[in-house]
Amino acid sequence: MTENSPIIGDLVEEYREVVLPARGRVRATLWFARQLASLVRPWMWGGILGFTLGAANLIGTALWPLADDTPVLMLSLLTIVLAALILIGAAAARERQRLWDGVLAGAMASLLAAVFVSTANHIRVTLFVDVLQHRDDWTGLMARFHASGQTDLRAFVSHEYWAGEVSGLLGSMTVGAICGALGAAINSARRARISRVSA
């Protein structure tokens, strides 16, 4: 029996007996989803984010292996990730109002997301290397492969992708920590503003 099981049981009971009759099915379902989401530790959302992005990358490659990563797409993904990390930092700092909680949650969430995305990307290049080698953005990689004298493209690409993983993960943690701190600061400013209005 998990720690959250009694809480979930109480939520289900409240949903059925109080919220559903008062709000209707759609609004009650949204309420229930918000309550469940609140039970997830803020940094764990990084794993959910990374899994979602990694799965989307695999599915997109399977369907459109030669599609270009357009600037609009990359900017949109970057915006989503940064906004999510800021929200995670704000959520983590809300309980005890400590900047450090936001920093730590942002760093951990970003690390988790990066691990999931990197793993999915490794699976992607391993599975689809025969098609991906014809992408325009692989021109430099293919030139390095031919210059290396190696014969196993899959092994070469795998090594290339994993070579910078440690620095990439450290960079992700740094960005996550900054976003988490920003989220914590926004949360503190919001609470201060509410306190002034209420006073």
Image (cartoon, helix red, strand yellow):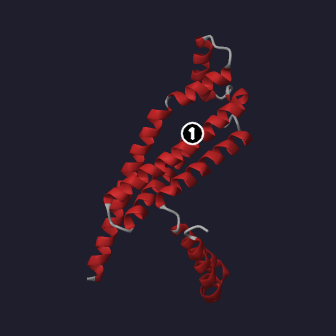
Depth check: 134 or 88 in front?
88
Asked if residue 93 lies left or right of residue 24, the reply is: left
Q: Say which amino acid is labelled 1.
A: Ser
Instruction: Write the residue at 26% across / 77% down.
Output: 196
Element at label 1? helix
Instruction: Write the residue at 45% across / 59% down.
Output: 88
Rendered position, 79 above or below 88: above
Depth check: 151 or 132 in front?
151
Instruction: Write the residue at 62% across / 41% down.
Output: 120
Rendered position, 105 above or below 146: below
Q: Quadrant of the N terminus?
A: bottom right
Q: Name the spot of residue 173 as percent of width and height, x first.
A: 42, 44
Q: Name the spot of residue 194 as percent of width and height, x first.
A: 32, 76
Q: Which residue is mark 1?
A: 118
> In the rendered image, is residue 49 in sight?
yes
Instruction: Write the residue at 32% across / 59% down.
Output: 99
Crowd rating for badge 1 (residues with CA inside 10 Å; few <14, some 14–19, many 20+) = some
